[in-house]
Amino acid sequence: MNQPIRKANNFDIIRIIFAWLVIVSHSYVLLGNKGCDPLCEWTHHYINFSYFGVKGFITISGFLIFKSLERSPNVVDYLWKRILRIYPGLMVVLLLSIGMAYLIYQPNQTYFKFEKEATSYILNNLTLYHNQWRIHGVFDKNFNTAINGSLWTMGFEFFFYLVLILLLPFRQFKWLVISILLMTIIGLLFGNVFHIDTLKHINFKLRVDFIAELGFFFLIGSFWAVLDWKNIPYRTLLALLALILSMVIIYFKLNPIWLGFSWPYLVLYIGQGSSRWADWIHRTIEDPSYGIYLYSFPVQQLIIYCFQPSVMVLLWTSTIVSFILGIASWKLIEKKTLRFKNLFVFGTH
């Protein structure tokens, strides 16, 4: 039976843009230049493009994953769909990274040392919570020796998926869910503003200060998902006010966490709109943003290792290669595995 065609919106295109913003920032950082991306330079190192890219990704995730939670007939179905969305693409990029690493491996140790580290690289990164960044003898002369530094967000993303399960028993009680989300968002804001240094020193598998920061944006995305977006009055006016607020926060260099009250709304306002570009992307390349994000870091590291390029050469060559790999990842791996997404659809909503 054919799956219904999803209505095209702008979420696919802006996620691609967010993935590209991460590529832009990494093009400066990975070369070890004292400079940073244009936004970073303009704001005197206050904020960079990747900040908006990552926070935009996490906001959309909070919004869409909560929608998925609402539709899921049971917790097994919900978790299966989350696993199916993350792991197939992740597994392939890890295996290809090991293949790349083997080809450029410059041993100071033995092959068996590489084999051991390569095995642990895959297994550790598949846990999402015990990232292994490097293999000795690979990228040792690069400014940054990590094979794929972008994997750091994976554990936080999946952690937030698990947190949302706590709302499963209450999802039919809209105002209760709204109240729980609001109280949690306020608590995270309080932690970010007043206790961020304390949170950094709490011993946990994931950095608690990052949980508070990313979770703030994720749950704001979830909060907007609970509301009936079409019935929110003055949506365009609110978007204009959110844009002004964002500009004020950036201009006066306030704590970036305050952008949580403006940037997520702008992202969702644009994302739920439609455009000709969105229609074209939906019909052709569809949803390659996850693959672009996964592949861009190792692609940039390999280009640096082989060619020692300038920033602009690195930016555009890595953009082209990462986009090709991202599209291939979606078409050949992610989309095909999603055919099994309804494997655990049982029970009633």
Image (cartoon, rainbow, N blue to C red):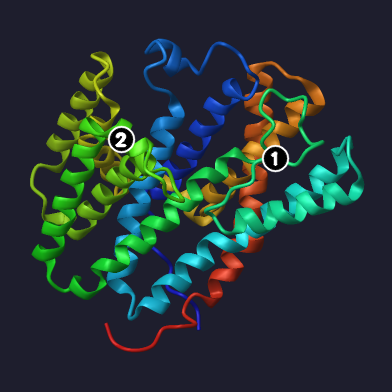
User: Does residue 41 show up?
Assistant: yes
Report whether 300 appears left or right of 68: right
Reading the image, the residue beneath label 2 is: 198
Q: Is residue 198 above or below residue 337?
A: above
Q: Is residue 341 above or below residue 201?
A: below
Report whether 197 appears left or right of 338: left
Residue 134 image label: 1
Label 1 crowd bin: few (<14), some (14–19), many (20+), radius 10 Å: some
Residue type indicated by callout 2: Thr
Residue shown at 36% from the left, 56% from the top: 160
Residue type indicated by callout 1: Arg
Mark 2 vs mark 1: which is more N-terminal? 1
Residue shown at 20% from the left, 47% from the top: 185
Relative image position of residue 289 (x, y in whole percent): 52, 47
Given residues 244 and 261, the one toward you in this image is: 261
Quadrant of res 259: top left
Quadrant of res 30: top right
- From the viewer's perspective, is the residue at label 2 or at label 1 nearer? 2
Report whether 217 appears left or right of 148: left
Residue shown at 69% from the left, 29% from the top: 317
Label 2 crowd bin: few (<14), some (14–19), many (20+), radius 10 Å: few
Number of numbered callouts drawn: 2
User: Does residue 274 show up?
Assistant: no
Relative image position of residue 104 (x, y in whole percent): 85, 38
